[in-house]
Amino acid sequence: MNQSNNIPLGILLMVLTTFVFAVQDGLSRHLAGEYNVLMVVMIRYWFFAAFVIALARRHAGGIRAAARTNQPVLQAFRGLLLAAEICVMVAAFTLLGLVESHAVFTCYPLLVAALSGPVLGERVGWRRWAAIGVGFIGVLVILQPGLAVFDPAAAIPLLAAAMFAVYGLLTRFVARQDTTATSFFWTGTMGAVAMTATGLWFWEPMSGADWIYMACLCVTGVTGHWLLIRCYEVAEASAVQPFAYLQLVFAAIIGMSIFGETIQTNVAIGAAMIVAAGLFTFWRERLQRVAD
């Protein structure tokens, strides 16, 4: 499909995407609080894999064309890395809640910017380095290292952010040779294989009500990915990506209204610094693309 540049529609789709993903995170928080994280992520991946396979079958060449790649090791590693990242982040939800987990996780675009030089050979100017520095000061404000009340578990979403940043960079790297459909296919299928191999060992009986929540989790996962694909089909990424930060807002609303979480002052200040730094890096990247 030829990409259009309908920015208003792209923004609307991105807002819907962030809302759906925030609902997905709320469902993950509930289910992982009741059952083993690996089992929850495994079932979620079964539906994700079914979704990407269904998409592949609709395109020319079918599954064989979608799976064709000259970099199978990198594609497989991407899929495994994302599955591991999801497990780590869902564990963070159960330990820290949605608000603090998402506040720290929002630094991943800054990690992408910082690593794009050594990994992809892209140039990162001093302005973006300054923004990256401000963003990581925001992370430190949230984590409060050195204080007696510091909880090492607060570093878990930071680990998830680092994993997701590497996943994003590898996705951009493999895109030099593979199509989006191929990368998406490998992401879903490899994750499903890995999670099935591990998650089945931790299977637990689930109540009827929680199976309904699990079905909703699977639907939101598929819907969120479909909306995201449509978003990038109708508008350029640099125009809509800043609106991805709304997921932090939606997750905070869900965390406070449903799970009784609160926003600490240091978390609010740190998150604001991270978001501001992230928006600045998006703005600089867009200026650089226009200049090129």
Image: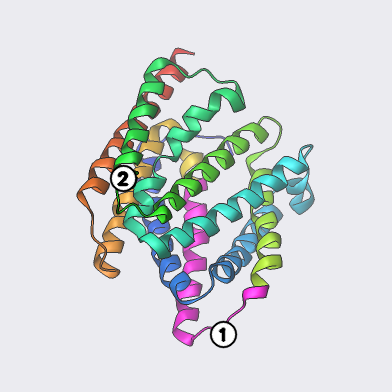
Say left or right for 135 vs 232.
left
Give the camera-side residue of 206 and 172.
Answer: 206
Q: Which residues are magenta?
A: 201-229
The quarter of the displayed image where residue 73 is located: top right
Residue 69 image position (x, y, % from top left): 77, 40
Query: Count the marks: how many?
Result: 2
Residue that label 2 marks: 144
- Identify which residue is drawn at 71% across, 32% down: 177
Residue that label 1 marks: 205
Residue 80 image position (x, y, % from top left): 66, 52
Q: Main secondary structure of the magenta part?
A: helix
Residue 280 image position (x, y, % from top left): 34, 27
From this viewpoint, which residue is outermost toward the front? 148
Say what secondary structure mark 1 lies in. loop
Give the camera-side residue of 77 and 143.
Answer: 143
Q: Are marks 1 and 2 in contact (CB under 8 Å)?
A: no
- Identify which residue is drawn at 22% across, 53% down: 264
Q: Residues within 10 Å of mark 2 (few under 14, many from 20)?
A: some
Q: What amino acid is at disc 2?
A: Gln
Say what secondary structure mark 2 lies in. loop
- Identify which residue is drawn at 51% across, 42% down: 162
Question: Does the image show residue 60?
Answer: no
